[in-house]
Image (tube, rainbow, N blue to C red):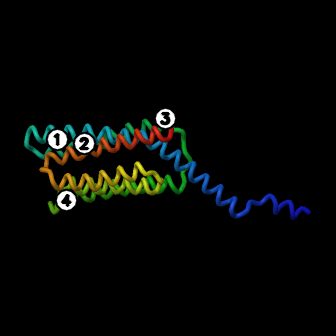
Amino acid sequence: MIQEKEQNKEMTAQESLNLIGEMLNNSRRSILRNSAKYFILWGALLVVWATAIYALWSGTGNPAWNWLWFAMPAVGYPLAAYLSKRDVALPENMISKHVGGIWIAYGIYTIALVLVGMATMAMPIPFLIVVVLGFAECISGVLLKNWPIMVAGFVLGVGGALAIALLDSPMHMLVFTFGGVVLVLTGLILKYQYK
């Protein structure tokens, strides 16, 4: 009789899978809800930085203004840290670790591509950055099962690469301005979807 009660208390395999699936879906929704503000933050910074560098480069004819890109993280990371202090702490899980890993990999790849591009001048650096940025966003959308993020990443990566291939150097900065707008719109869509 006691053994029968213990068996009834145990979850079936299907119940366990349903519980795990529900927990992962809740985690995905929480990540998407919290991600909205970071898409908006980094998108807005990208718009400001790219537009300023475009104006300075076009106005002076000097591409050295591109060094200002290194100041963007100096502004963005403290702002992101401030925003994260206001977040409700989410338990870390497989999905959050993978999304974080994607963006860490993006940062490492971008720095490596910029350094290789500067050393070899083999490919336009903005082309490489916009392709990797779009890819990182698209893969994040796939992992989070969110079509707006996937589509925005594809538009940014493929559309941005095409635009950079067709435009002259200072105009490349306007592609990044467009990329920032795409990130802001993605954040606004997420904010609306996950109120």
Q: Determine contact: label 1, label 3, CB under 8 Å.
A: no
Q: Nearer the viewer, residue 96 or 151?
A: 151
Q: Quadrant of the N terminus?
A: bottom right
Residue annotated with mark 1: 54
Q: CA distance from mark 3 to mark 2?
A: 28 Å
Disc number for residue 177: 2
Q: Tell me where residue 164 appears, x and y as whole percent.
A: 19, 53
Q: Is residue 143 above or below residue 171?
A: below
Q: CA distance from mark 4 to mark 2?
A: 21 Å
Estimate how packed mark 4 is, as few (under 14), some (14 to 19) or many (20 or more) residues with alpha carbons within 10 Å. Answer: some
Secondary structure under the numbered disc 4 in the rendered image:
helix
Q: Residue at x 38, y 37 (%)?
A: 79
| Mark-to-mark CA distance, 1 and 4 | 19 Å
How far is mark 2 from mark 1, CA to CA?
9 Å
Q: Which amino acid, by three-letter code, is at mark 3?
A: Arg
Residue occupying image coordinates x 49% and y 35%: 86
- Label 2 near label 4: C-beta < 8 Å? no
Residue 156, x across and y down, in percent: 30, 51
